[in-house]
Structure formats: structure tokens, C-alpha cells
Amino acid sequence: MKKYLSMLLVGAMIFSLSACEKKEPENPAPADTETTEPAETTEEPAEAQVPSAEEGTAFAGTNGEKMVGTITIKSEWIPFAEPIVLESIFNNSAVISGEKAYVLADKTLKEFAFDGTKATFSQDIALDAEYENMQLGTDGSLYFSSFMRPLIGWKDGAKTFSFEGPKNVCMHSSGEWGISFFPGSVAEKLTISDGTLKTAPLGGDVLESVSSAFVTENNIFLWGQAKGNEHSALAVFDTNGKFKFHLGYTGSESFQPDSLGSITSVIETENGFLALDGNMRNIVLWKPDGAFIGTIDVKELFGTSYPWLSSAQKMPDGSIIIGLSQKRDDESGEEFLLYRINGF
């Protein structure tokens, strides 16, 4: 019995000792662990802040000269006293009438005093609606049109006529007729007589579709896709609507030197035809019979960088006024610019 009690006592002592031992974790960390250094982070350099249009640096143009074939074209920058900063580069235009210049910028008509070398802002002129197209008549009238807007004549601060129905219109300088057009539809010749407006289709047998139209003293130009052809071209008609020839490549090959991108204006001189190609950023020249002369890269002629060519006007002295938009070097805005060219 004593032996049995002794064995119980010894077992209890062993159990007590084992219960007081400090237990190690099941997966102890190694004694010599290395301290992990935080990963180095490289901060991205802060992006340069684009200045506002007011704080940005206005465009400063230069005069230039470029030769194409045997023709030398010279350019002269015409500054605005205060820059015209645009919201959109499209559908802006300018015309000069005597000592006044008119600019249609972002659908707002602006009047400037013009001394032959510089344009100084005079006033904004309110019209009854927002317009995208503007032409000048020989008597100083202005003509305005836009899709879903009435065609109006305007002179000396008052409307001279208003007609519902036409789409985008390019008026002849006489103010007696013009061409109505809308992308994808057939163009129409408009005639104004005795206070009424008459229309007749034009160009449907020559072009698959018409995108825009231009009018000079002696010719009508429809810009669109040539019939049976994937190329776009200028179809030239006389003022009675008789087709004469195409300007621009209409063959079966791919891109050629006289292929066109997007024509925004056409001028006719005694030396031939001059067109502004907005997409290509080129001035394109043809002889009076339609023979291709060549193209001029306007970046070289104007000292610009990828500008959008908007409008052209033939002046009484034979020079041509060109309106275009150009992004500033500091990207603070797009400006509307004027240049005068001579030599064609």
C-alpha cells in the first residue's frame, strides 16, 4: 500500500513540473532573422501645368516664301491686336471689306478695324441665330447660313433678306444666287429674284455625294466623292451648271501627289485655281485648264505647325487672305490667324 501511494505522489510531481514549463510556438521564428528594409519609392515628376489662354503666350507669326514649279508664293502674317482664342478649330472664317474685317469665330461675328497690316477689335455683332458659313458680296453685304437656320443677307447692321429652307450655302458675290449643300445630299443652285427663292439640283450625275461647295466669279466647285471612284475631288462647273472637269486625282491608283484630303476653300485667279486642303495642311494649285501644278506645305510658308486651314478670300489687288487656326506652343489654346499671300 505504501508502495502504491509513493508511485502516485511521484506521478503528481512530474505532472506539476510539466504543466509549469514555458511552451515554444509550434513554428518558432529563426533566431537570426534579417530586418526587411522598406522598398524605395521613386516619385513621378510633376507634370508641367498648361497655362490658361489668358496667361499663355500668343502666337507670333513670320513671313515666308515657297516655290512650286515656276511660281513663287510669298506670305505676310497679319496680326490681331488681341489674339482670337478658339473653342473649336472648325467653321471659322474671315473676310475683309475696305477698312473693316469680319471674323466668324465659334459662331460669333466679330468686327475689326483693318489698316492693311493689322486688325483691331471693334465689336461683337449679334445675329438672330448661330451661323457657320459666311461670304462677302461686292457691295459689302455679308451672307450667313447653317443647316436648320435661315439664309440671311446682312448689311450696315440690318438684314436685307431671310429665306427658310436652304442648308449650308455658298453665295455668289452678286448676292443673286448661290449653292446649297449638305453632306450626303444632292447640291442645289439657288436663285433669288423678286423676293423669291428658286432651287434646281446640281452635280448629281458627276458626284456620288457632295460635302461642300464653293463659288467664284466664273465657276462653281462641288467637293465630294467622284462617281464610280473611291477618291474625293473638286467637280468644276460653269455658272450655268455645266460640268467642265475634275480637280484632284480620280484614277484607279491609291494616293497620288494630286490626291486631296478635305477642301475648305477655293479661289480662282488668272493663273488658275487655288484650294486650301484642311486635312493635308496644303495649298494646292492648278492651271486654268485643270492641269495640276503642285502643293505647298503651309508649315513652311507660314511658320506654323499642323494648322487647320479655314477660309480664303481674293482681294482687289490680287492678293489672297487666308484664315487658319493654330495651337500655341505652350498648348494654352488655339488661335485664329490671318495671312496674306501673293504670287498667284
Image (cartoon, rainbow, N blue to C red):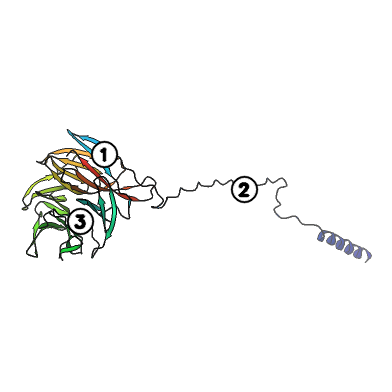
| Residue 55 placement, left or right of 317 | right
Q: As rendered, which of 68 and 84 lies closer to the eye?
A: 84
Q: What residue do we see at 13% from left, 45% from top?
A: 268
Q: Position of residue 177 (x, y in %)?
A: 10, 57
Residue that lies at the very extreme toward the top in this rendered image: 70
Mark 3, secondary structure of its residue: strand
- Mark 1 surroundings: few (<14), some (14-19) or many (≥20) residues within 10 A: many
Q: Earlier in the sequence, mark 3 or mark 2?
A: 2
Residues under labels 3 and 2: Cα distance? 66 Å
The answer to whether marks 1 and 3 mark residues whose Cβ atoms lie closer than 8 Å is: no
Q: Earlier in the sequence, mark 1 or mark 3?
A: 3
Identify the amino acid type marked 1: Leu
| Residue 333 placement, left or right of 338 | right
Count of marks overlaid on the render: 3
Q: As rendered, which of 142 and 242 lies closer to the eye?
A: 142
Q: Which mark is residue 134?
A: 3
| Residue 57 placement, left or right of 3 | left
Residue at the spot of label 2:
38
Residues under labels 2 and 1: Cα distance? 58 Å
Residue at the spot of label 1:
301
Quadrant including the N terminus: bottom right
For discs 2 and 1, the disc positioned in front in the rendered view: 1
Q: As rendered, which of 167 and 316 lies closer to the eye?
A: 316
For discs 3 and 2, the disc positioned in front in the rendered view: 3
